[in-house]
Amino acid sequence: MSRFDTLAAAKYDSTPAIEKRNRINLEEVFGENLFGLYEMKARMPSAQYEAFLSTIQNRTELDESVADAVASAMKEWALEKGATHYAHWFQPLTGSTAEKHDSFLKPTGDGRAITDFRGKELVQGEPDGSSFPTGGLRATFEARGYTGWDPTSPAFIMEGPGGAYLCIPTVFASWAGDALDKKTPLLRSMDVIDVQARRALGLFGSPSKPVTATCGAEQEFFLVDEEFYYRRPDLQTAGRTLFGTKPPKGQELDDHYFGSIPSRVLECMNEVEVELYRLGVPITTRHNEVAPGQYEMAPIYEDANQAADHQQLVMSTLRRVARKYGLVCLLHEKPFQGVNGSGKHLNWSLSTEDQNLLEPGETPHDNMQFLFFCSATLKAVAKHQDLLRAAVAHAGNDHRLGANEAPPAIISAFCGDQLQDVFEQIEKAGEATSSMPSGLLGLGVKSLPDLPKHAGDRNRTSPFAFTGNKWEFRALGSSQSVSFPAMVLNTVVAEAIDDLCTKLEAELEQGTSFDDALRSLLASEIHEFKHVVFNGDNYSDEWVTEAEDRGLLNLRSTMDALPRMVDEKNLKLFEKYGVLSNRELESRFEIFVEQYFIAINIEGETAQHMAETMFLPAAVRYLNNLLTTAERADDLGMKAG
């Protein structure tokens, strides 16, 4: 089929009619398919609800009677929503999600049946685990796997043309107790950073409150017409184009970024948003991205565990809903050569129920608690560049990192002018006495008000940037689960907080005042981590040279980065804090390496298949046409060529 025919087919065959939708009350829609605390409180006895609330707030063990009460309320709610089955919804080491559906229906033996769902079925399941990647954690013949309910992430209803079913977020472990999923280590890391952050707050005289790692992932993606997608075996099989040529017009005019969203795409994104709202996913932003056909959606930041679950729902919902509009959602990091690829920015912070610990306030130089936690984060980045780089290493991301559209493979941190100035004052004088003011920005138009102006600009080229009240880890790939990078970030920062607290406590035991001990500690730590701070252009060739002079790592490819994951210091780190045993970390290294080579092999075999079945036959036909033309020219006495 010619290119014209393909375009015509895309225009007339694949585009569904867009009907005007009824107005939706977003407040009523949000969370309607979520069995959250609102539904629990309305349906459970108050004593058992309070016991459950205490469990999730204080991360304590759940009583069996409370589990039965939750299961009963959850079942009644799910049945009212039209659910016929329930599924333990987990995240194996494939990077996607998995589920096995079990019916609520139980035969009574007299030809009838009842619906039943008990606490033991809520708390534990036993899917066959034999076909999931384990990285050598068990022998081939060992198949038993357990799922365990995660009460900190609410259950939800998934709806489809064939009916509805209840999804219960769970962890997944082997018979021997090894974590076979991405959720378990993330939850462990959240416990670890909670303990260490509370310890730090205690030194500052703050009341002991749970500290939660919070995340928000900005998701980039492409939407392409199905007609084009199905004419590209490489897109279907490898997720990216392996052959092609640069179009006459790409993104050179910069006219797609933040442009008006095409009506068909907007309708698709509207439906995606509404479905996610129903699941309690707090999507708040959508816009055109840089490349033609590229878009972004982002949520409000939330508890890191729920954020990771919600990120999986965002990706699966985008894929599913796009098909209803004759579109295909591409999550590969580099589906098309010559235009920007897609990434995922992981916004990360630490919060209590009433305070963001990375909020600098109006005078950051006076906010010693804020400076302490910022210093801990930078200390972690400086010590564990290798681990942070390995956490985002996979085949798709190799096409994106360092390509002047995404952060380089060198892990550095951007502090901004204001924070950088405060750190420099502390390093030189032992204390900071001022902060760069924010001020107002006048636009030179009388009818326009002055705009609040930040104390410093942003740096879009940095892989790890402070953006006002959070750190933004920008090196993740668009197809990647955020669980592993978030787990790594939690763990390395927890270690840094632990180390800083230990040093502070030692000084206090020597009789040093807290203020003097803290100022001295920050000054010495700033000197140790300042080599990882870079506020300039990370895309420049000069930075590569300077980074090498600073002693920073430049792990350019996945196979440069992944082996660092199992370096001795990293094995000891995860083992010390109980986040991953040596066996569990080594298994992930084995799985990531295998997944890398499988992806490369699929691309190679796809390229070979396309060359043999599409391009070589076309070339032979073209050659035959040339030969036929030459023969006819000879017959006419003309000289061909």
Image: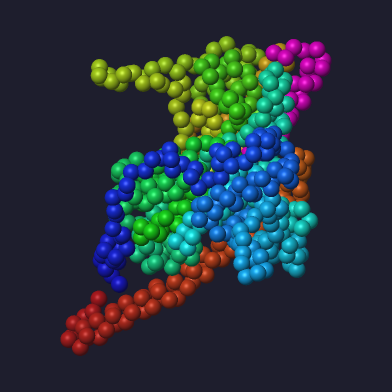
Q: Is residue 567 magenta?
A: no
At x 74%, y 42%, the residue is 63
At x 49%, y 69%, the residue is 606
Q: Which residues are magenta?
A: 488-515
In screen coordinates, is 67 left or right of 330? right
The extreme front residue here reads 110
Q: Give x and y (percent) for residue 487.
A: 64, 42
The extreme bottom residue here reads 635
Up the image or down, 371 lies above or below 379; here it is above
Magenta span main SS: helix
Up the image or down, 312 lies above or below 416; here it is below
In screen coordinates, is 615 left or right of 412? left
Q: Nearer the viewer, residue 483 or 257?
A: 483
Q: Give x and y (percent) for residue 627.
A: 29, 82
Q: Give x and y (percent) for residue 57.
A: 66, 34
Residue 528, quarter of picture: top right
Q: Give x and y (percent) for residue 641.
A: 25, 76
> Is any part of residue 391 visible from this angle?
no
Residue 636, quarter of picture: bottom left
At x 59%, y 42%, the residue is 43
